[in-house]
Image (spheres, rainbow, N blue to C red):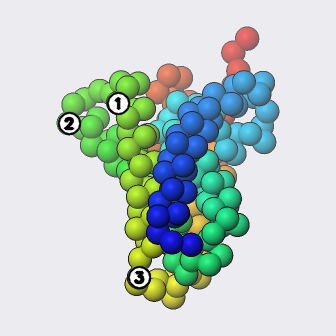
C-alpha cells in the first residue's frame, strides 16, 4: 500500500476517532451505567476519563487498519503505539499547561484540545508508518508498551489513584461516581 492510501486511512481515522470519541463522552450514561462500557467510555469529568475518549476509539480504529493494510507495513505496530501514547501525552500536558498559565479552561478549549491530540496522533502514525526507516526492531517493545497503557486504562477506571488527574472536578470523586437519584 502506498503512502497516499495510508494518508487517506489516517484522515478517515481522524474523523472517525473524533466522532466516536465524542460519543464515548456520553455512552456510559446513555447505557444506563452499564459497567463493562466503563472500560472504554468516560465515567466522570476527570482529565483521565477524557483521555480514554481518544485512546479507545484510536485503538479500535488501529485494529481495523491492521487488517486493512497494517500487516504489510513494517512500521505499523510502532506507529500505532506512538500514536496511542501521543493522545494522553498531548491532552494531559497541554491541559495542565493551560491550567497553569491561564488558570481555567472551557468546554471549547477541551474540545479543541481533544481534536488537536487526535490530529497529532494520526499525523505521527502516518509519518512512522510510511517512513523508509525500519523501526521493526522495536516491535516487541511496542507490544509491551501497548499492554502497559491498556492495563493502565483498564485498571485506573475502576481503581483510580487519588491524584488530580483522576479527580472529577464536578463531584470531587474518583472513578465511577455513584448515581444520584
Q: Pointer 1 and pointer 3: residues touching (CB < 8 Å)? A: no
Which residue shows up at 43% across the image and 40% down it?
Answer: 115
Mark toward the viewer: 1 or 3: 3
Residue 173 lies left or right of residue 101; in this view the side is right
Q: Disc number at residue 109? A: 1
- Judged from the image, the secondary structure of the residue bearing numbered disc 2 is helix
Q: Which residue carries the number 3 mark?
A: 132
What's the distance in space between the residues labelled 2 and 1, CA to CA? 14 Å
Q: Which residue carries the number 2 mark?
A: 101
Q: Disc number at residue 43? A: none
> For the N terminus, which image quadrant?
bottom right
- Tell me which numbered mark, 1 or 3, is placed earlier along the sequence: 1
Residue 24, quarter of the rendered image: top right
Residue in the foreground of this view, choosing between 157 and 67: 67
Q: Is residue 117 above or below residue 22?
A: below
Camera sees residue 82:
no
> For the C terminus, which image quadrant?
top right
Q: Position of residue 75 (x, y in %)?
A: 51, 77
What's the distance in space between the residues labelled 1 and 3, CA to CA? 36 Å
- Judged from the image, the secondary structure of the residue bearing numbered disc 3 is loop
Residue in the foreground of this view, choosing between 3 and 137: 3
Query: Circle 1: is it few (<14), some (14-19), or many (20+) Cα within 10 Å?
Result: few
Q: Is residue 29 above or below residue 51?
A: above
Query: Circle 2: is it few (<14), some (14-19), or many (20+) Cα within 10 Å?
Result: few
- Tell me which numbered mark, 2 or 3, is placed earlier along the sequence: 2
Residue in the foreground of this view, choosing between 138 and 42: 138
Which residue shows up at 46% across the image and 27% down it?
Answer: 169
Q: Position of residue 84 (x, y in %)?
A: 51, 59
Residue 124, quarter of the rendered image: bottom left
Residue 133, quarter of the rendered image: bottom left
Camera sees residue 94:
yes
Amino acid at each position: 500500500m502506498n503512502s497516499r492510501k495510508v494518508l487517506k486511512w489516517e484522515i478517515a481515522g481522524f474523523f472517525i476517532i473524533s466522532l466516536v470519541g465524542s460519543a464515548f463522552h456520553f455512552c456510559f450514561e446513555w447505557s444506563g451505567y452499564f459497567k463493562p462500557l466503563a472500560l472504554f467510555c468516560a465515567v466522570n469529568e476527570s482529565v483521565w476519563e477524557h483521555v480514554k475518549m481518544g485512546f479507545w476509539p484510536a485503538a479500535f480504529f488501529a485494529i481495523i487498519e491492521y487488517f486493512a493494510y497494517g500487516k504489510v507495513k513494517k512500521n505499523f505496530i510502532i506507529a500505532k503505539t506512538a500514536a496511542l501514547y501521543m493522545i494522553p501525552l498531548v491532552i494531559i500536558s497541554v491541559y495542565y499547561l493551560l491550567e497553569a498559565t491561564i488558570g481555567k479552561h472551557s468546554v471549547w478549549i477541551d474540545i479543541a484540545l481533544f481534536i488537536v491530540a487526535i490530529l497529532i496522533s494520526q499525523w505521527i502514525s502516518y509519518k512512522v508508518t510510511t517512513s523508509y526507516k525500519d523501526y521493526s526492531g522495536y516491535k516487541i517493545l511496542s507490544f509491551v508498551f501497548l499492554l502497559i497503557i491498556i492495563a493502565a486504562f483498564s485498571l485506573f477506571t475502576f481503581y483510580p489513584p487519588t491524584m488530580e488527574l483522576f479527580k472529577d472536578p464536578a463531584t470531587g470523586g474518583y472513578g465511577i461516581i455513584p448515581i444520584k437519584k
